[in-house]
Each structure stands twice: as structure tokens, then as C-alpha cells.
């Protein structure tokens, strides 16, 4: 059973002709980053808002760690769930420190503990505490505001993060930086994240799994690699635009295509001088390393530890799925 489970969940807004979310069932595993991808109006935000009970399903049930969430009081539920939205939602009349400290303050933490936590979080998101803690949101760039929104959502160390197009209003370069930061943070913090996007490249870069929605329904739920190489419908194929493979090799992460080392690392011959590549690099970088070194296989590493192997066949499969 997933850490977050949707069991046949539907929501029809009053007076609406059709359901905004229509019979969704899916298990989200603990520690995974799942990107909800789909066109405007397909129900992504609605699905997300049911998880922290901003909306209640018309039918079906959502479970958090096996507890039906309708049994958890909304305020208590929201303390366990960080929420980040597109316009950062920072309180304009509060400083950065006050914004980040909102939830800890609600939870009755001491002033000193809050101050320590705020500084720790500013460090974590790469903003110098002494420079930023006393600023107001209007004195920050859009990207910095989104980082503070992220810090605020992380403040009480929730297990679950809901992120609704958090980088939607950010320019492309800053957006890539923020995506890298999310990947770095996620490796460190291992939250269970539901991340809404309608940007295919963002989904491919960030996701452990992509949940594709169309008109309120889940049409495919799979790894980026599988979604790209084995779309189950023309809709998903069109959405992903699988014709531009070179571009996508540049986006797909090595760790989504590799063969992972199973239980027995000894079964992998990784100490024979095989070239190594970081799990977060792209398949295009893997391909150039293979061509440059002439080695058929690469060892995929995470902080120096071998976690998988990648061969030309893996790359070829993602370049020519059919
Ligand atoms: N509060 C509401 N009352 C009535 N209808 C709503 C409400 N919120 C959303 N809807 C409708 O429900 C459907 C799904 O909306 P939702 O906001 O979940 O889409 P979305 O996938 O997040 O779209 P976008 O990518 O544009 O943010 C849409 O048809 C929308 O008009
Ligand atoms: Mg939305």
C-alpha cells in the first residue's frame, strides 16, 4: 500500500457538468517525487488540494500512511503536509523570517528554536540568513520568493510536500536552477512529493514517477523512462512529443534508464576501471562518455557509491522506443 493512496477518488464541483477528478486510483510510494502532468483544466490542482483537505472528494477515499484523511482534522493534517504554490503565497507584511516561521509559531515552538530553524532553512535553500531574514517579500526576486515559499513549507519538517507549479512563473534559467535544488534537497530529505506541472521537460527531469492526467482521469502512471519509451496512448505520446529524441536524451536522467544494482552489489563488476557517471547526469552526457572512452558500460554512482550500470542498449532503447 502506498504512503499516499487514492482509492477511486472523484470530485464534481457543484453545478459542474462533468467531474474535475474522475475515479482516480493510485499508490504513491514513500520518499518518491511524483510529477502530476497534464493539460490545463485536467484536474491536477483539484487532485492536489484533496490531499490537504482544501477540497473534499465527492466519492472515494484518500489514505495517508494507511489512515483515511477524512479522519484527520484539517489543521492537524496540514501540519504534516507542506504546500507550495505558484505565486509563493508569502505574506507581504511579514519578513522572510516571520514567513518561514509561521507554522512553527502555530505549533508553539520557542522563539529561539524558531530562529535556529529559520536560519537552518535559509542555509538549506542557499540564501544567506543574515542577508535575507529581515527582508520583506517585495524585496526579493521571483525565484527567491519561491525558495522562501519552499523553506516555509519545509519549516515543520513535514513528510509530504504538495507543490503546485511552484516554478510556473519563473524564467527558464532560474527555473533550471530551482529544479536542480529540488533534486539536491530531495536526495537529502527524501520527502514524499506531489509536484504539479504542465511542463514536460520539468516532469522528465524531476520525477521518480510521472502521473499523466487527462480530463480528470489518470491515463498513465510510470517512470519517466517508461512514459517516454512506452506511452500507452496517443495522448501521452503527443504530450511527450517523442519525436524529438535528442532533446529528450538531454533531459532524461541516467538513473531513470540504468539497470539498478539489486541486492548483491558483488554481482556487479564495478571495479574494473569502468568509467563512472553521476546518477543525475543526462543520457546525452552518458552517450558522449561512452563514445569518448570507448567503454560499452558505465557505472552509475551516487556520492561515489555504485548504484547501477548503463549500457549503450539502455540509451538506444530510449532514443528508439519502438
Ligand atoms: N473551485 C472550483 N469550482 C468549480 N470548478 C472548479 C473549481 N476549481 C476548478 N474547477 C474546474 O475543475 C476542472 C479542473 O481544474 P483544475 O484547477 O484542477 O485544473 P488544472 O489541471 O490544475 O489546470 P491548470 O493547469 O490550468 O492549473 C476545471 O474544469 C476547472 O474549471
Ligand atoms: Mg492548476
Image (cartoon, helix red, strand yellow):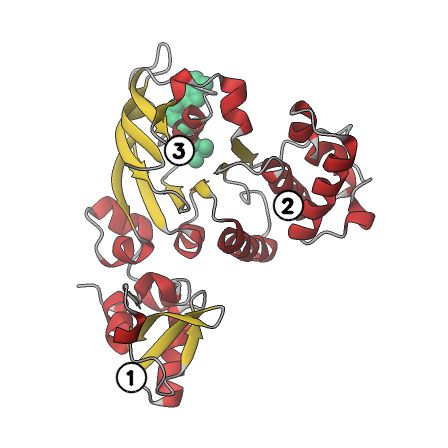
Direction top: furthest residue: 15
Q: Earlier in the sequence, mark 3 or mark 2?
A: 3
Residue 139: image tag: none
Question: Where, quadrant-wise, is the N terminus in this rendering?
Answer: top left
How crowded pointer 3 is (Cα within 10 Å; few <14, some 14-19, many 20+) is rated as many
Mark 1 lies on residue: 296
In the rendered image, the vertical position of residue 236 relative to residue 73, given as above or below: below
Q: Is residue 96 visible?
A: no
The image position of residue 48, as x and y in percent, is 43, 30
Q: Residue, x 37% and y 52% (percent of image)?
A: 208
Q: Is residue 80 left or right of residue 263?
A: right
Query: Residue 44 has which mark?
Result: 3
Looking at the image, is 183 positioned above or below residue 102? below
Within 8 Å of ligand 1, the CB of disc 3?
yes
Q: Residue at x 31, y 55 (%)?
A: 241
Image coordinates for residue 59, horizontal then vertical, percent: 29, 16
Q: Nearer the viewer, residue 76 or 8?
A: 76
Residue occupied by mark 2 = 147
Q: Is residue 214 above or below residue 239?
A: above
Secondary structure beneath label 3: helix
- Which quarter of the rendering shows the C terminus? bottom left
Q: In this orientation, which residue lies closer to the viewer: 188 or 181?
A: 188
Amino acid at each position: 500500500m502506498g504512503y499516499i493512496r487514492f482509492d477511486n477518488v472523484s470530485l464534481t464541483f457543484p453545478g459542474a457538468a462533468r467531474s474535475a477528478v474522475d475515479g482516480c486510483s493510485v499508490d504513491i510510494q514513500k520518499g518518491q517525487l511524483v510529477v502530476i502532468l497534464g493539460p490545463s483544466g485536467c484536474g491536477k490542482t483539484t487532485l492536489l488540494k484533496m490531499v490537504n483537505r482544501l477540497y473534499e472528494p465527492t466519492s472515494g477515499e484518500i489514505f495517508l500512511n494507511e489512515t483515511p484523511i477524512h479522519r484527520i482534522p484539517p489543521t492537524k493534517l496540514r501540519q504534516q503536509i507542506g504546500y507550495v504554490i505558484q505565486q509563493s503565497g508569502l505574506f507581504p507584511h511579514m519578513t522572510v523570517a516571520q514567513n518561514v516561521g509561521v507554522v512553527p509559531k502555530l505549533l508553539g515552538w520557542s522563539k529561539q528554536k524558531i530562529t535556529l530553524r529559520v536560519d537552518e532553512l535559509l542555509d538549506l535553500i542557499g540564501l544567506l540568513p543574515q542577508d535575507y531574514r529581515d527582508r520583506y517579500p517585495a524585496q526579493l526576486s521571483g525565484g527567491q520568493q519561491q525558495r522562501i515559499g519552499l523553506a516555509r513549507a519545509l519549516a515543520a519538517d513535514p513528510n509530504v510536500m504538495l507543490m503546485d507549479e511552484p516554478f510556473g512563473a519563473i524564467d527558464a534559467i532560474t527555473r533550471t536552477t530551482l529544479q536542480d535544488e529540488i533534486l539536491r534537497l530531495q536526495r537529502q530529505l527524501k520527502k514524499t512529493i506531489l509536484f504539479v506541472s504542465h511542463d514536460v521537460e520539468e516532469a522528465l527531469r524531476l520525477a521518480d514517477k510521472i502521473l499523466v492526467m487527462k480530463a480528470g482521469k489518470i491515463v498513465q502512471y510510470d517512470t519517466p523512462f517508461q512514459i517516454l519509451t512506452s506511452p500507452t496512448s496517443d495522448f501521452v505520446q503527443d504530450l511527450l512529443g517523442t519525436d524529438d529524441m535528442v532533446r529528450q536524451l538531454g533531459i532524461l536522467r541516467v538513473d531513470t534508464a540504468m539497470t539498478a544494482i539489486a541486492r548483491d552489489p558483488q554481482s556487479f563488476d564495478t571495479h574494473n576501471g569502468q568509467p563512472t557517471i553521476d546518477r543525475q547526469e543526462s543520457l546525452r552526457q552518458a552517450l558522449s562518455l561512452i563514445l569518448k572512452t570507448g567503454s560499452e558500460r558505465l557505472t552509475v554512482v551516487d556520492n561515489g557509491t555504485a548504484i547501477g550500470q548503463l549500457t549503450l542498449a539502455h540509451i538506444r532503447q530510449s532514443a528508439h522506443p519502438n
